[in-house]
């Protein structure tokens, strides 16, 4: 990790442009369907596959193969994510009220069919199955399609236990394209959610409009803001936890003393000596940066501009500073609020906006699986017709005015 005292404009730019490569794969899948998906699965995942869908027998075998402790951990995670999603859903209600003789309102309607992307290229991520599928189930989505490359039994089990209706053994850009447009065997969905590498994230950008997507979610990133009260080993471990996702993951440390940054760096290098994922983690860690800032206000300004996916505040007077931060995927307050707890078991979602998308959206939640759709019922139209007619004429839309005027007489 490089230690610097100056932030350049490049710090706030996304330099992971793979658009042309991704477009060509999407177009191929749109044109050639299953055969293209098979070709790219063989090319990128080194896997030859005939039947995309996970069978009932495979699901049963996956569940029975799990150690008891793993099964308990999955169920604990599912329960906490489900409880939080139910609490969130309970915060929104159907609305119906009268205004000037009209009955107005909105209805909360679940999306009918969603696709949940579960990364699996470097590691199996059953936790992402929980995070993407459980809120969909709570929202009332009828068809929940899960896709994951190099699918491991633990991911299959997690997806089934979380509530997936179908599970497919594909990933990458080809899976996003298949979900967006459908193939001979994979149904097109109304919305795609879930994190992924830069190729998956770009694919979601490209298909948006033909189907819905949640937001840009990947590659992973964390920013830790720490003062002298923080534990350097805690901070180092949290930085490495993001770096091990993939080579494009990034970790950022904002602190107020160069000596603290050096302590963190020393701890991280010690951890890397024995870390089983050191090959990937070390590469990403060496591309990451620690910045020495002058005061908390400077740190706040940088964090709000960067809008990191995960923001950890390891500060002595953290409660005095929390409300200053506005842009983040998810916030972790205090030395013991490890980002990894949010990844797995606390109940909030770990599918979070990256690439500064937290400036305009929060993380994945039950709200991503519902539509708030308005309605109106008007029986006495005289007052509405009067004023709508005036505004339509002002805009020069005379058929609009006509549609309003004809109702004045009835």
Image (cartoon, helix red, strand yellow):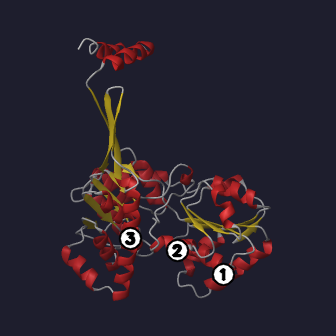
> Which residue is labeled 1 in the image?
233
> Which residue is labeled 3 in the image?
45
Q: Tell me residue 322's x, y (percent).
A: 64, 60
Question: For residue 325, which numbered disc appears in the image?
Answer: none
| Closer to us: 56 or 327 | 327
Secondary structure type for disc 2: helix
| Closer to us: 380 or 210 | 380
Q: Tell me residue 67's x, y (percent).
A: 34, 88
Residue depicted at x 59% and y 59%? 308
Q: Residues within 10 Å of mark 2 (few under 14, many from 20)?
A: some
**Label 2–label 3 contact, CB within 8 A:** no
In the rendered view, does 157 fall on the left or right side of 337? Answer: left
Q: Quadrant of residue 374?
A: top left
Instruction: Looking at the image, tell me whether mark 1 or mark 3 is earlier in sequence order.
Output: 3
| Closer to us: 37 or 65 | 65
Q: Quadrant of the C terminus?
A: top left
Q: Quadrant of residue 314?
A: bottom right
Q: Tell us which disc is closer to us: 2 or 3.
A: 2
> Which residue is labeled 2 in the image?
340
Distance in Å between CA atoms under marks 2 and 3: 27 Å
């Amino acid at each position: 990790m490089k230690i610097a005292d100056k932030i350049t404009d490049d710090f706030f730019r996304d330099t992971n442009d793979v658009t042309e490569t991704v477009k060509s794969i999407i177009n191929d899948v749109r044109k050639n369907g299953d055969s293209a998906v098979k070709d790219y699965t063989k090319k990128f995942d080194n896997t030859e596959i005939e039947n995309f869908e996970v069978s009932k027998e495979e699901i049963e075998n996956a569940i029975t193969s799990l150690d008891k402790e793993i099964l308990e951990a999955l169920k604990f995670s599912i329960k906490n994510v489900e409880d939080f999603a139910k609490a969130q859903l309970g915060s929104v209600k159907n609305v119906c009220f009268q205004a000037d003789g009209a009955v107005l309102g909105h209805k909360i309607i679940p999306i009918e069919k969603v696709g949940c992307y579960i990364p699996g290229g470097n590691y199996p991520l059953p936790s992402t199955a929980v995070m993407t599928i459980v809120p969909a189930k709570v929202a009332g989505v009828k068809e929940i399609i899960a896709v994951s490359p190099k699918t491991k039994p633990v991911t299959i089990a997690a997806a089934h236990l979380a509530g997936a209706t179908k599970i497919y053994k594909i990933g990458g850009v080809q899976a996003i394209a298949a979900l967006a447009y459908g193939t001979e065997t994979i149904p097109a969905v109304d919305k795609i959610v879930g994190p992924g590498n830069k190729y998956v994230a770009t694919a979601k950008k490209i298909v948006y409009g033909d189907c819905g997507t949640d937001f840009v979610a990947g590659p992973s990133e964390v920013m830790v803001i720490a003062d002298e009260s923080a534990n350097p080993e805690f901070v180092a471990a949290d930085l490495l936890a993001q770096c091990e996702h993939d080579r494009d993951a990034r970790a950022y440390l904002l602190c107020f003393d160069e000596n603290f940054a050096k302590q963190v760096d020393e701890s991280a290098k010690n951890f890397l000596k024995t870390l089983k994922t050191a090959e990937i983690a070390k590469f990403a860690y060496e591309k990451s940066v620690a910045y020495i800032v002058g005061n908390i206000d400077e740190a706040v300004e940088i964090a709000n501009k960067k809008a990191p996916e995960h923001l950890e505040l390891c500060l002595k007077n953290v409660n005095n500073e929390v409300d200053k931060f506005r842009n983040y995927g998810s916030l972790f307050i205090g030395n013991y609020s490890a980002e990894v707890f949010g990844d797995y078991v606390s109940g909030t979602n770990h599918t979070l906006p990256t690439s500064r998308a937290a400036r305009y959206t929060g993380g994945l939640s039950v709200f991503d699986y519902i539509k708030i759709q308005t309605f109106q019922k008007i029986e006495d139209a005289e007052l509405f017709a009067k004023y709508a007619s005036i505004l339509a004429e002002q805009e020069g839309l005379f058929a609009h005015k006509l549609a309003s005027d004809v109702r004045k007489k009835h």
